[in-house]
Image: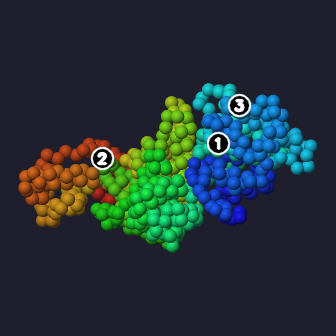
Amino acid sequence: MQHSLPTWAIELVDLYQSNAANQFIVHGNIHDRMLIPGAQPRLGSITDFLLEVLLPRFDVVLSYDVGNGIRIERGAPAFAEWPRIKENPDLPRNPRQAVEALTHYFRYCANLGRLRQKPLQVACLIKDANLLAPPSTGGLDIDVAATSVLIRDWSVDSALTGHPLATFLLAENLNDIHPLIANNPRTSRVKVGLPDVDEHTLAIQHLTAEYPTALRNFAEQPESLARQLTGATLSAVESRLKASEYAQRPLASGDMAVLKNRMVERDANGLLELMQSTRTLDELHGMAGVKDWLRQDIQLWRQNDNSALPKGYLVCGPVGTGKSFLVECLAGEAGVPVVKLKNFRDKWVGSTEGNLERIFRLLHALGRCYVFIDEADQTLGKRDSASNDSGLSGRVYSMIAEEMGSSASRGRIIWILASSRPDLIEVDLKRPGRIDVTIPLFPSATPAASFQLLSAISKTRSLPLTDADFEPVKASMPSMLTAGAADALAAKMYRETRTRACTAVEALQRCIAGYRPPVPLATLEQQIRIAMRETNDTRFLPPEFEHLMESER
């Protein structure tokens, strides 16, 4: 039976049965539905799973949450033998008093066990443990500290650890738990991940009978659907099936990419955006060396040759040079999604760290993906935190650096940092093993290069320009043109052709006659120098800009 359990449950059972731990922080995807095995499998909560699958042999099982107080989940007759209950059957609801009452009961059972040949096996589930023992907000909260100490003692007091007692602290994020408990070496931390392919397959097999119309196209091949749903929660999947069954509309493979994106983004509570791209590297103008390198990496990825695969890229260059566009083209070429981190920072203590935990859980469940962090110099934090952020920047930096450097994610997650000021990103984040390749992007160096760039972008608006069209505009064609500026010019050209009924080259002449660059030349040159200094492979550097580096020597 044990082999049918999810990985986290097997880990928990092994730790308890080996006497390695009797207290567990169960964190991660704990609010999801999960398959409860048995004669008639069903989807249930993690509380259902613990009660019905892991704790059926325990004599007394209690639970506590701030809304319902102490509840007797199993073994009411045995619990009723406690003298305190006989004197006063009303149990306290306040967190500190409730934890004190639970501690007294555990000690009672431990003392009673010394007098019996077979002591009572007792388990206790603390739901939303982060509400009982949240991290410190700066000042000392005596009630929170006392509650945290009592809970910690359940795992370190020899009178309790020698008794068959198991306590489970349920919280979505480790960072939401008071450090007295979260950092206790006697408390084991068990992470519940998002469902993998096998768990999705079992759930779909079970749900087929309940939602026959919705799953009609996958009834014979549940694993096919399960692979497409990796990264989504079972709760989101079940909700989608209910809607499809009600509408009598079967799910189709062609719908799954969009549906999965919606489910993942909803589960992430707006912390990230999941993008599927249809672009390819062919849509990038120029940059032959960069495209060759990236295509080699994609080929290695497809062959599972991870030893030579980079853990991450740093895409840098002046504002408007197309860093985000390059990422879209790379993802479309590779055929994998792009996870774009959004605003995960929060004003509440511990919330930012909790948001990152949730993001990392989703990344681990998605399989292969690119993780894109735009404006990385501002987003990633600093090793040395500023005094005005209570150390938050340093904690963010530490968590992201650890995740980027994790060897377990090699071949599954590739990080892409984008910045016009890569010199402001911490050096340790840019080292090999986190960022292995730096890709610089530059504006056009000559009027001819500007024309070629503008010509390529104009074609997407059905404004063809030929090589012969360059001569009339050669004298006024600006150099140092970025992809963003060229796209804006192409939009103006389109407007001219629509409002003045002129040709594309006539529209171009009108548009560049009064053109002023959106970014000052001095700023562009500074950002070019920075990008050239950051580059770790000279084949990516255009010779036309060597003079900018020579001016610094």
Give the percent coordinates (x, y) of residue 430.
49, 51
Q: Nearer the viewer, residue 237 or 356?
A: 237
Gap between marks 3 and 1 measured at Cα: 16 Å
* Whether residue 189 is visible: yes
Horizontal side of residue 258 vs 517, given as left or right: right
Gap between marks 1 and 2 measured at Cα: 55 Å
First reached walking from the N terminus: tag 1 or tag 2? 1
Position of the N terminus by quadrant:
bottom right
Horizontal side of residue 305 vs 88, given as left or right: left
Q: Nearer the viewer, residue 462 or 76?
A: 76
Q: Nearer the viewer, mark 3 or mark 1?
A: 3
Horizontal side of residue 93 vs 233, given as left or right: right
First reached walking from the N terminus: tag 3 or tag 2? 3
Give the percent coordinates (x, y) of residue 512.
15, 50
The residue depicted at 45 percent of the width and 51 percent of the height is 265
First reached walking from the N terminus: tag 3 or tag 1? 3
Mark 1 lies on a secondary structure that is loop
Compared with 240, 393 (above or below) is above
Packing grade of label 3 (10 A; few <14, some 14-19, many >=20) is some
- The amino acid marked with disc number 1 is Lys
Q: Which mark is residue 127?
A: 1
Marks 1/2 in contact by CB < 8 Å: the verdict is: no
Residue at mark 2: 524
* Whether residue 432 is visible: no
The residue depicted at 11 percent of the width and 54 percent of the height is 498
Q: Which mark is residue 411?
A: none
The residue depicted at 82 percent of the width and 37 percent of the height is 82
Residue at mark 3: 92
The residue depicted at 63 percent of the width and 58 percent of the height is 36
Packing grade of label 2 (10 A; few <14, some 14-19, many >=20) is many
